[in-house]
């Protein structure tokens, strides 16, 4: 698997978010206090390519989580927000990976695995990992992050998955992850709880996170750009937000694998 590390340490700056202007002072060379990951779920081809382009403009590597079977003819659309004709295939995902972006597993068919019979859910998890190993160049499940659909899991499903992969992302009773250690294997995220544009919601969460002096690792999970997917954000807003964040020495914007590689 090809990966690039894009580390932003561009000095002190000011970040305007919400209604005020936030300034965090931190000397150059010190470990950043706030890590931010923007992850995109499902596999919307147009949105993922545009989000990748925007990340690249700022010297960043995106985080893209793909439904393994979404491009196949037999894929059944699970809801009104995941449309078969909008989904990319593994030629697209291999291309994004070759450009330095993270492409990871978001289940086989976007079932709520916690609501399925346990053995059926385990088989679907295994099936998605098998498919990625066959179709995503260089993919090894032991290095993978499995992103549970709906952030829904059970202890048994988590244990089954963690026996095979590096880490999982699922629901949790925490919004901000602590800085990772060698023991970090379960990740949580914040996700816009409604359909419709999520720009203001993302802005509020990022602002709140940066105002917290304790810092940590915020994973902001969304889906598409524009009008694709559940709770999409606008491309213009993503571009503007990343442009602000990379100017802060206290903030580092990385995908999940980069964070674990660098700080775990």
Image: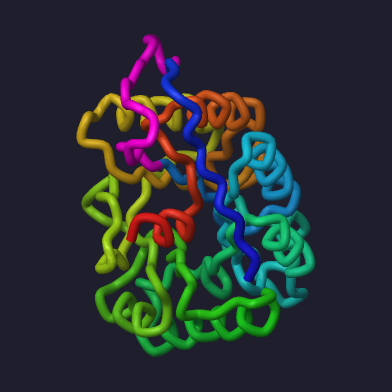
The magenta segment: 16-35
Q: Is residue 195 above or below residue 134?
A: above
**Image position of 238 with respect to 118: above or below:** above
Residue 79 visible? The answer is: no
The quarter holding residue 115 reads bottom left
Q: Is residue 105 magenta?
A: no
Dividing the image into 4 quarters, which one contains the N terminus? bottom right
Where, by quadrant of the figure, is residue 121 drawn? bottom left
Q: Is residue 188 visible?
A: yes
Q: Is residue 22 magenta?
A: yes
Q: Position of residue 134 (x, y in %)?
A: 67, 84
User: In percent of the image, x 61 and y 51: which residue is there?
Assistant: 81
Q: Main secondary structure of the magenta part?
A: loop
| The residue positioned farthest toward the front in the image shown | 29
Q: Tell me if 136 is positioned left or right of 113 in this view.
A: right
Q: Residue at x 58, y 85 (%)?
A: 130
Q: Is residue 167 left or right of residue 74?
A: left
Residue at left 40%, top 73%? 166
Q: Quadrant of the C terminus?
A: bottom left
Which residue is nearer to you in this view: 30 or 172? 30
The residue nearer to you, when weighing 79 against 233, is 233
Residue 259 place in picture, x, y as percent: 42, 54
Residue 230 pos. (x, y %): 55, 45
Q: Position of residue 144 (x, y in %)?
A: 49, 72
Residue appearing at x 23%, y 49% in the figure: 174
**In this picture, residue 91 sits left or right of residue 127:** right
């Amino acid at each position: 698997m090809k990966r690039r590390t894009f580390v932003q340490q561009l000095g002190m700056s000011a970040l305007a978010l919400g209604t005020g202007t936030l300034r965090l002072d931190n000397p150059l060379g010190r470990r950043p206090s706030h890590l931010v990951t923007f992850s995109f779920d499902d596999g919307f081809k147009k949105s993922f390519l545009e989000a990748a382009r925007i990340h690249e403009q700022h010297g960043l590597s995106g985080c893209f989580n793909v439904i393994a079977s979404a491009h196949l003819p037999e894929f059944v659309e699970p809801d009104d927000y995941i449309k078969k004709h909008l989904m990319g295939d593994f030629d697209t995902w291999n291309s994004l990976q070759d450009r330095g972006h993270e492409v990871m597993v978001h289940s086989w068919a976007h079932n709520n695995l916690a609501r399925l019979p346990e053995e059926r859910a385990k088989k679907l998890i295994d099936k998605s990992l098998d498919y990625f190993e066959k179709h995503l160049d260089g993919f090894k499940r032991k290095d993978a992050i499995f992103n549970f659909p709906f952030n829904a899991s059970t202890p048994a499903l988590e244990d089954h998955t963690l026996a095979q992969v590096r880490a999982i992302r699922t629901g949790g009773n925490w919004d901000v992850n602590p800085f990772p250690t060698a023991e970090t294997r379960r990740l949580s995220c914040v996700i816009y709880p409604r359909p419709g544009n999520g720009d203001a919601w993302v802005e509020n969460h990022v602002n709140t996170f940066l105002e917290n002096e304790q810092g940590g690792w915020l994973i902001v999970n969304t889906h598409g750009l524009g009008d694709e997917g559940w709770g999409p954000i606008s491309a213009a807003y993503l571009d503007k937000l990343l442009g602000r964040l990379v100017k802060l020495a206290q903030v580092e914007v990385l995908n999940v694998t980069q964070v674990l590689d660098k700080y775990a």
